[in-house]
Amino acid sequence: MLIADLRQLEGRNYPARRRTQHLVGGASPIQSANFAMGHVTLEPRGGQVPWHNQDQEEVYLILEGRGELCLGDERREIEAGQAVWIPPRVFHQITNTGDRPLRMIYVYAPGGDVAHWRQELDGTLPRAGIEAPPLPPGACPQWTSTPPADPPQGGSS
Protein backbone atom coordinates (compact mmCIF):
# COMPACT_ATOMS: atom_id res chain seq x y z
CA MET A 1 0.00 0.00 0.00
CA LEU A 2 1.34 3.43 -0.94
CA ILE A 3 0.63 6.31 1.42
CA ALA A 4 1.59 9.96 0.94
CA ASP A 5 1.71 11.70 4.34
CA LEU A 6 1.69 15.52 4.33
CA ARG A 7 3.64 15.46 7.60
CA GLN A 8 6.47 13.65 5.84
CA LEU A 9 6.40 15.07 2.29
CA GLU A 10 9.20 17.57 1.85
CA GLY A 11 7.51 19.62 -0.87
CA ARG A 12 8.99 22.57 -2.72
CA ASN A 13 9.05 26.29 -2.01
CA TYR A 14 8.34 28.51 -5.01
CA PRO A 15 9.40 32.13 -5.54
CA ALA A 16 5.79 33.37 -5.46
CA ARG A 17 5.72 32.58 -1.71
CA ARG A 18 4.06 29.19 -1.68
CA ARG A 19 4.90 25.62 -0.74
CA THR A 20 3.60 22.72 -2.84
CA GLN A 21 3.49 19.13 -1.63
CA HIS A 22 2.58 16.52 -4.25
CA LEU A 23 0.19 13.90 -2.90
CA VAL A 24 -0.26 12.12 -6.26
CA GLY A 25 2.29 12.68 -9.03
CA GLY A 26 5.48 14.73 -8.90
CA ALA A 27 7.78 13.64 -6.06
CA SER A 28 5.03 11.68 -4.29
CA PRO A 29 5.33 7.94 -3.72
CA ILE A 30 1.87 7.70 -5.36
CA GLN A 31 1.86 8.04 -9.14
CA SER A 32 -1.13 8.13 -11.50
CA ALA A 33 -1.42 8.75 -15.23
CA ASN A 34 -5.05 9.80 -14.81
CA PHE A 35 -4.79 12.65 -12.28
CA ALA A 36 -2.47 14.61 -10.00
CA MET A 37 -3.23 15.96 -6.53
CA GLY A 38 -1.37 18.19 -4.13
CA HIS A 39 -1.45 20.44 -1.10
CA VAL A 40 -0.46 24.10 -1.42
CA THR A 41 0.21 26.66 1.29
CA LEU A 42 0.20 30.32 0.22
CA GLU A 43 1.99 32.68 2.57
CA PRO A 44 -0.10 35.48 4.14
CA ARG A 45 -0.64 38.75 2.27
CA GLY A 46 0.48 37.87 -1.21
CA GLY A 47 1.52 34.22 -1.51
CA GLN A 48 0.40 33.15 -4.96
CA VAL A 49 -0.03 30.57 -7.67
CA PRO A 50 0.72 33.06 -10.48
CA TRP A 51 -1.30 33.67 -13.66
CA HIS A 52 -0.89 30.61 -15.87
CA ASN A 53 -2.80 28.06 -17.88
CA GLN A 54 -2.44 24.38 -18.67
CA ASP A 55 -4.03 21.71 -20.84
CA GLN A 56 -5.57 19.86 -17.89
CA GLU A 57 -8.83 20.66 -16.16
CA GLU A 58 -8.33 21.39 -12.46
CA VAL A 59 -10.16 21.91 -9.17
CA TYR A 60 -8.96 24.00 -6.22
CA LEU A 61 -10.46 23.18 -2.80
CA ILE A 62 -9.76 25.86 -0.19
CA LEU A 63 -9.14 24.26 3.20
CA GLU A 64 -8.12 27.30 5.25
CA GLY A 65 -7.80 31.04 4.71
CA ARG A 66 -9.10 33.40 2.06
CA GLY A 67 -7.87 34.84 -1.17
CA GLU A 68 -8.58 36.24 -4.58
CA LEU A 69 -9.12 33.87 -7.49
CA CYS A 70 -8.84 35.08 -11.06
CA LEU A 71 -10.20 32.82 -13.79
CA GLY A 72 -10.23 34.14 -17.34
CA ASP A 73 -11.84 37.58 -17.09
CA GLU A 74 -13.46 36.92 -13.68
CA ARG A 75 -12.15 37.90 -10.24
CA ARG A 76 -13.72 36.61 -7.02
CA GLU A 77 -12.98 36.28 -3.33
CA ILE A 78 -12.66 32.65 -2.27
CA GLU A 79 -12.51 31.18 1.23
CA ALA A 80 -12.29 27.96 3.22
CA GLY A 81 -14.89 25.40 2.26
CA GLN A 82 -15.18 26.51 -1.37
CA ALA A 83 -14.06 24.64 -4.47
CA VAL A 84 -13.65 26.03 -7.97
CA TRP A 85 -13.43 24.21 -11.30
CA ILE A 86 -10.81 25.51 -13.74
CA PRO A 87 -11.42 24.56 -17.37
CA PRO A 88 -8.50 23.45 -19.56
CA ARG A 89 -6.35 26.21 -21.14
CA VAL A 90 -8.04 29.06 -19.19
CA PHE A 91 -5.59 31.39 -17.43
CA HIS A 92 -6.00 31.48 -13.66
CA GLN A 93 -4.28 32.79 -10.52
CA ILE A 94 -4.91 32.57 -6.79
CA THR A 95 -3.47 35.05 -4.29
CA ASN A 96 -3.67 34.95 -0.50
CA THR A 97 -5.22 38.25 0.58
CA GLY A 98 -5.52 37.30 4.25
CA ASP A 99 -3.27 37.60 7.28
CA ARG A 100 -3.03 33.81 7.74
CA PRO A 101 -1.76 31.07 5.43
CA LEU A 102 -4.16 29.92 2.74
CA ARG A 103 -4.12 26.12 2.41
CA MET A 104 -5.69 24.33 -0.52
CA ILE A 105 -5.83 21.04 -2.37
CA TYR A 106 -5.53 20.92 -6.15
CA VAL A 107 -6.54 18.04 -8.40
CA TYR A 108 -5.99 18.05 -12.14
CA ALA A 109 -6.50 15.50 -14.88
CA PRO A 110 -4.87 13.95 -16.69
CA GLY A 111 -1.77 13.71 -14.51
CA GLY A 112 1.77 14.78 -15.36
CA ASP A 113 3.83 17.91 -14.86
CA VAL A 114 2.50 21.35 -15.72
CA ALA A 115 4.78 23.95 -17.29
CA HIS A 116 4.12 26.78 -14.83
CA TRP A 117 6.10 25.05 -12.05
CA ARG A 118 9.33 25.14 -14.06
CA GLN A 119 8.52 28.54 -15.59
CA GLU A 120 8.16 30.08 -12.15
CA LEU A 121 11.45 28.58 -10.94
CA ASP A 122 13.19 29.73 -14.15
CA GLY A 123 11.61 33.21 -14.12
CA THR A 124 9.98 32.58 -17.53
CA LEU A 125 6.27 32.72 -16.69
CA PRO A 126 4.29 34.43 -19.46
CA ARG A 127 3.50 37.93 -18.17
CA ALA A 128 -0.13 38.99 -17.84
CA GLY A 129 -1.09 41.47 -20.54
CA ILE A 130 2.16 40.90 -22.47
CA GLU A 131 2.74 37.23 -23.38
CA ALA A 132 -0.55 36.14 -21.75
CA PRO A 133 -4.04 37.65 -21.52
CA PRO A 134 -4.39 40.48 -18.99
CA LEU A 135 -5.58 39.85 -15.45
CA PRO A 136 -9.16 40.94 -14.69
CA PRO A 137 -9.50 44.60 -13.67
CA GLY A 138 -8.58 45.25 -10.03
CA ALA A 139 -6.76 41.90 -9.60
CA CYS A 140 -3.72 41.45 -7.40
CA PRO A 141 -0.61 41.74 -9.60
CA GLN A 142 0.95 38.60 -11.03
CA TRP A 143 4.17 37.51 -9.41
CA THR A 144 6.92 37.57 -12.02
CA SER A 145 10.36 37.87 -10.48
CA THR A 146 9.98 40.16 -7.48
CA PRO A 147 7.17 40.49 -4.96
CA PRO A 148 4.79 43.43 -5.41
CA ALA A 149 5.89 46.63 -3.63
CA ASP A 150 2.72 46.68 -1.54
CA PRO A 151 1.13 43.46 -0.30
CA PRO A 152 -2.40 42.89 -1.63
CA GLN A 153 -5.16 44.23 0.55
CA GLY A 154 -7.86 42.03 -0.93
CA GLY A 155 -10.90 43.37 -2.61
CA SER A 156 -14.38 42.42 -3.52
CA SER A 157 -15.40 40.97 -6.81
Image (cartoon, rainbow, N blue to C red):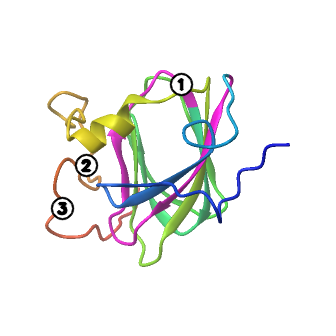
Give how far apart the Cα atoms at labels 3 and 1 are.
29 Å
Question: Residue 67: x and y, percent?
Answer: 45, 62
Disc 3 marks a residue whose amino acid type is: Pro
Near-viewer residue (124 or 63): 124
Disc 3 target residue: 148
Is residue 106 left or right of 146 when viewed as pictured? right
Most extreme residue toward the bottom is 99
Residue 39 counted in the magenta span? yes
Q: Are marks 2 and 3 in contact (CB under 8 Å)?
A: no
- What residue is shown at x 26% (from left), y 53% (from top)? 138
| Quarter the C terminus occupies | bottom left
**Residue 4 at x, y = what percent?**
71, 51
**Mark 1 residue type:** Gln
> Please, what secondary structure does the residue beneath circle 2 have?
loop
Which residue, as the protein is rendered here, is positioned at the far right? 1
Residue 135: in sight, yes or no?
no
Q: Residues within 10 Å of mark 1 (few under 14, many from 20)?
A: some
Q: Which residues are magenta?
A: 34-57
Q: Which mark is residue 142?
A: 2
Callout 2: few (<14), some (14-19), or many (20+) C-alpha neighbours within 10 Å? many
Estimate the x, y position of residue 7 in percent, counting from the top left.
65, 66
In this picture, residue 110 sits left or right of residue 18: right
Residue 56: numbered disc: 1
From the viewer's side, name the closer residue of 118 and 10.
10
